[in-house]
């Protein structure tokens, strides 16, 4: 396996320079703290992990590992997108039939497409839940470390949520079926409702005035190059910031709590490795983090759990894709709008809002498309972005679920989430032909599909 | 002028020029994405001889246009919802009614509903319920001088008292 004959060392004796003599299996079974540390330093795949992590931040029921789940889904989406790139043809004449081939003619094609499609749906959910977790635990707040900029990482996260949604939306058009065509009609008309520049924005999105080949190729390139590239860059930056900010907010919390038993101050090396303290004056002297029990080696404790989460995500998604097929509607038909025409579930709350927000003031009318499709989502995103700076709660509120000092904020967030959830449910289950309201148990009236 | 000032000056000039060059090239690359030529379907379309149109309504799906005929009087209303651009559907009224629209009587035989967000329009295209911000557009109709076909002009909106009388 090794090309070079390395100077042989007795098994217990460790090499002086980690990384010079990489040993792949260190990463799985380190025999000492030293080997555990060296595993991180000398392994390319592990270099982004700290050497030691606080035990509390690994807890399943603190983070639910939602960020890891999101990243695992992103990985799967990239991997499952690979074969699809070879099979899909981005042309209005052939897009639909190439998807049909993937679905019915290609070996395992249906499964690959389902992995990609359900992965996208799950990723929207996972990224949102990750954001909700960070909000509810106040994890965008800075703790005791120097140079922390957690609020900035939160902003990156908001952009990553937007990138995830845009990726879903652009991927939606590609099958060129009815669902795709009308979702894009509505989506781009929302853009054109912006005063003054709207029509030009729509024309730029579509590459013309009607949804046609230029639109398909634009959405395709956005979907396979621009947005994945942007999300990838944001992801890397996001992880780098997590390291610079000293890991999860929960680790700071342990650093602030006094040690259960007075321990002799130890060398600052541990803190530096944790990334908790930098600069000249470590703020931590004796606290929970010093406790031997409080920290564990990232290899294998963190890597084992990360592997469980990633492989578990793979397993769940793969099983889902085997059990459920991805729908494909009729080919896109510019002549007939489906009745009802529904957006994907994560945009249904917006579809509800644009339905209800047209305002008439005397003879003056503001299109609901602008209020519900541009202003309101813009406000929500803006509010999310600046929230860490509006949050005046004490530092102690970071890294814990539902602290007293952030109760009002958390309730506000939950109410907004609930409102969005209710609108989504109404859109999913209670809207029938002509977007009329029907209870789920009511049957829809028979309406001829064509004039 | 000291050595240091000159270096500083040159550095500024150099970096500014570099930024300008990169910025301009970036803008040029992006400008290529704004289409200069439109391959859209023409907006002035012959839709057939007047005699081919039935009394009442005929829907032309590829133009997204309703053409109404009342004897020898024609008018055309767009099927594009003014809210978010879905195609509205026509529903025949149980009994036609006559309404004065822009000072002219108009026989209403249908009403329109949008499948996307539930906007509703009366037979003259006026928005009556739902999120639609304005009435459906009325388009100009004419007779082609060469073969006598009806010509719809989808770029020319007209008032609601427009009628083409043969």
Image: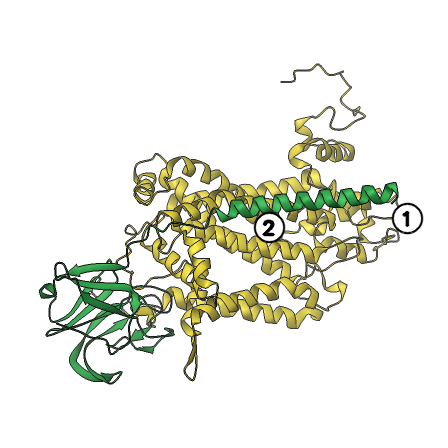
Residue A10 lies left or right of residue B154; in this view the side is right
**Mark 1: few/some/many CA within 10 Å (<14, 14-19, 20+):** few
Query: Residue A264, labelled with which disc?
Result: 1
Where residue A261 appears, x then y in whole percent?
A: 86, 54
Say yes or no: labels 1 and 2 on the same chain: yes
Viewer-side residue, A235 vs B62 = B62
Residue B100 lies left or right of residue A73; in this view the side is left
Closer to the camera: disc 1 or disc 2? 2
Asked if the residues shown at circle 1 and circle 2 are in contact, with their CB atoms under 8 angstroms apart, the answer is no
Q: What colour-coding does the image apply? A: by chain
Residue B26 lies left or right of residue A188; in this view the side is right
Viewer-side residue, B92 vs B149 = B149
Subunit bearing disc 2: A
Residue at (71% x, 44% y) in the render: B15
Residue at (74% x, 40% y) in the render: A51
Query: Residue A67, labelled with which disc?
Result: 2
Q: Is residue A344 above or below residue B1?
A: below
Q: Marks 1/2: CA distance? A: 36 Å
Q: Chain A: what color?
A: yellow
Where residue A44 appears, x then y in whole percent?
A: 66, 33
Q: Chain B: what color?
A: green
């Amino acid at each position: 396996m090794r090309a070079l004959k390395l100077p042989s060392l007795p098994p217990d004796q460790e090499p002086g320079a980690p990384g010079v003599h990489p040993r792949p299996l260190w990463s799985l079974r380190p025999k000492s703290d030293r080997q555990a540390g060296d595993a991180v330093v000398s392994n390319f795949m592990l270099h982004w992990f700290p050497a030691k992590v606080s035990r509390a931040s690994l807890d399943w029921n603190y983070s639910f590992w939602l960020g890891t789940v999101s990243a695992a889904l992103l990985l799967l989406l990239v991997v499952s997108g690979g074969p699809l790139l070879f099979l899909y043809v981005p042309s209005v004449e052939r897009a639909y039939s190439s998807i049909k081939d993937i679905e019915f003619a290609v070996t395992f094609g249906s499964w690959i497409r389902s992995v990609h499609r359900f992965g996208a749906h799950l990723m929207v959910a996972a990224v949102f839940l990750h954001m909700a977790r960070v909000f509810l635990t106040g994890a965008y707040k800075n703790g005791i470390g120097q140079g922390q900029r957690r609020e900035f990482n939160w902003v990156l996260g908001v952009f990553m949520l937007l990138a995830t949604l845009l990726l879903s939306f652009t991927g939606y058009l590609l099958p060129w079926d009815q669902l795709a065509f009308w979702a894009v009609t509505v989506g781009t008309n929302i853009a054109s409702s912006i005063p003054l520049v709207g029509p030009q924005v729509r024309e730029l999105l579509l590459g013309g005035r009607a949804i046609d080949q230029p639109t398909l190729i634009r959405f395709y390139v956005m979907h396979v190059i621009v947005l994945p590239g942007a999300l990838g860059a944001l992801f890397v930056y996001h992880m780098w910031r997590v390291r610079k900010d000293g890991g999860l907010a929960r680790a700071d919390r342990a650093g602030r709590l006094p040690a259960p038993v007075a321990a002799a101050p130890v060398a600052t090396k541990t803190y530096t490795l944790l990334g908790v303290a930098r600069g000249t004056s470590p703020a931590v002297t004796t606290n929970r983090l010093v406790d031997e029990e409080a920290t564990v080696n990232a290899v294998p404790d963190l890597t084992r759990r990360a592997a469980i989460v990633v492989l578990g995500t793979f397993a769940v998604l793969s099983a889902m894709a085997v059990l459920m097929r991805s729908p494909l509607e009729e080919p896109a038909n510019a002549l007939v709008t489906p009745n009802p025409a529904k957006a994907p579930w994560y945009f249904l709350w917006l579809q509800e809002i644009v339905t209800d927000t047209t305002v008439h003031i005397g003879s003056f009318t503001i299109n609901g498309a602008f209020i519900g499709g541009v202003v309101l989502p813009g406000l929500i995103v803006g509010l999310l972005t600046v929230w860490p700076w509006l949050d005046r709660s004490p530092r102690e509120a970071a890294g814990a679920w539902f602290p007293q000092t952030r109760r009002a904020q958390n309730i506000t967030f939950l109410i907004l989430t609930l409102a969005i959830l209710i609108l989504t449910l109404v859109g999913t289950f209670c809207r029938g032909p002509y977007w009329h309201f029907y209870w789920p148990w009511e049957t829809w009236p028979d309406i001829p599909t064509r004039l | 002028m000291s050595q240091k000032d000159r270096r500083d000056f040159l550095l500024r000039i150099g970096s500014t020029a570099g930024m300008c060059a990169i910025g301009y090239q970036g803008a040029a690359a992006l400008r290529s994405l704004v289409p200069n030529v439109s391959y859209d379907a023409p907006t002035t379309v012959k839709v057939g001889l007047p005699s081919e149109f039935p009394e009442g309504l005929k829907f032309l799906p590829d133009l997204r246009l309703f053409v109404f005929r009342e004897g020898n009087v024609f008018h055309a209303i767009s099927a594009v919802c003014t809210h978010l651009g879905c195609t509205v559907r026509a529903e025949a009224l149980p009994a036609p009614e006559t309404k004065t629209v822009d000072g002219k009587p108009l026989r209403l035989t249908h009403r329109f509903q949008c499948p996307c967000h539930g906007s509703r329009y009366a037979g003259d295209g006026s928005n009556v319920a739902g999120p639609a911000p304005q009435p459906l557009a009325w388009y100009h109709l004419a007779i082609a001088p060469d073969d006598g076909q009806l010509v719809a002009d989808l770029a020319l909106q007209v008032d609601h008292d427009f009628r083409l009388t043969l």
